Image (tube, rainbow, N blue to C red):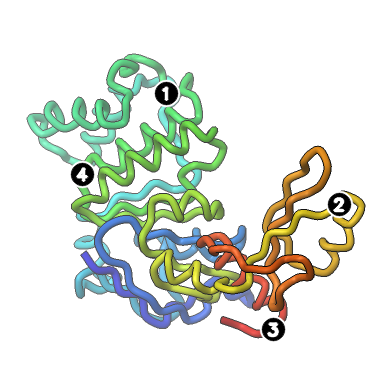
Amino acid sequence: MEIQITSLRKTYGNKTALDGITFSVGNGMFGLIGRNGAGKTTLMRILATLSRPSGGQVTFDGIPLEDTKKIRAFIGYLPQEFSLYQDMSILEVMRYLAALSDIPGKTCRERIPRLLQQVNLWDDRTKKAGKLSGGMKRRLGIAQALLDDPQVLIVDEPTAGLDPEERLRFYTLLDEFSSSRTVVVSSHIMSDIEAVCENVAVLDAGRLLFAGTVGTLAKKAEGKVFELAIPKKEQDAVKRNYHILSSQSRASDVRIRVLADQIPAGCPVSCVPTAWDGYMELLRQLEKGVGN
């Protein structure tokens, strides 16, 4: 399914949350990346038909966003914050939500066990929702979002508060689901998006900075990423003069990865950039007032 977003705007009084953004989303995993306050959640809520745009257009395979009933029939949504029925077991939560969605009993008996097995919660199905860990709650959230077998899944900041192992498990689950569907996932953690998404969009302060493949995003920093090994006493000077991507202290020196328009002294060649490097270069150019 193709989601087409055209000149989309959203304002709250005098505040602009989305400023005329245009891009498209196809099948598979699509990543939405940006700092806190970039407009990611606003966009996700619009796509989930929970918020009306102030201008512009969104279509799902040509179906306009205004046709709310038709769109809600084929989308699933997992917000950043969601509530569970604390005193119900995992299985009871799933059965209750299925009943609210008018899913036939036979379908429930087949689908609920399969979904709970997919998210690795079947063996814990009698546990109370209020007793689940953060990772288990997120996996239950995915299972409930998939109850209606949606063609499009919208997931907002799904790994917030999860440890690395749970994050990997969660994204593996989303990747499996996306093989025949569209999954839009937002995050402020570029490494997560880079690992599972082929296509991404970068938002900042409501504006679209980039939309395209992860490889094309990485090329934004081509020839501008350098790695320096410097004495520890020179670390502060380097931080003043360059945009730091990462640093690692060692016994005798510090290894620093930097963004720079010109080759730093003592650094003969540039490094192969990652999507994270490209993302940081977009933000660096924005701060310089150059734009993308």
Q: Nearer the viewer, mark 4 or mark 2?
A: 2
Q: Amino acid type of disc 3? A: Gly
Q: Residue 148: which disc?
A: 4
Q: Which residue appears at 25% of the width and 26% of the height? A: 117
Q: Residues within 10 Å of mark 1 (few under 14, many from 20)?
A: many
Secondary structure, mark 4, is loop
Q: Residues within 10 Å of mark 2 (few under 14, many from 20)?
A: few
Q: Quadrant of residue 59?
A: bottom left
- Outermost residue on the left side: it is 106
Q: Amino acid type of disc 4? A: Asp
| Residue occupied by mark 2 | 231
* Alpha carbons under labels 2 and 3: distance apart: 32 Å
Secondary structure, mark 3, is loop
Secondary structure, mark 1, is helix
* Alpha carbons under labels 1 and 4: distance apart: 20 Å
* Alpha carbons under labels 2 and 1: distance apart: 52 Å
Q: Nearer the viewer, mark 2 or mark 3?
A: 2
Q: Quadrant of residue 39?
A: bottom right
| Residue occupied by mark 1 | 129
Mark toward the start of the polypeptide (4 vs 2): 4
Please indicate whether residue 253 sits to the left or right of residue 99 in the image. right
Q: Which residue appears at 10% of the width and 36% of the height? A: 104
90 over 165 or under it: above or below: above
- Where residue 266 sits: x, y (%)? 77, 66
Pick whichever, 225 or 267, lies toward us.
267
| Residue occupied by mark 3 | 289
Q: Nearer the viewer, mark 2 or mark 1?
A: 2
Q: Residues within 10 Å of mark 3 (few under 14, many from 20)?
A: few
* Alpha carbons under labels 4 and 3: distance apart: 46 Å
Pick whichever, 236 or 26, lies toward us.
236
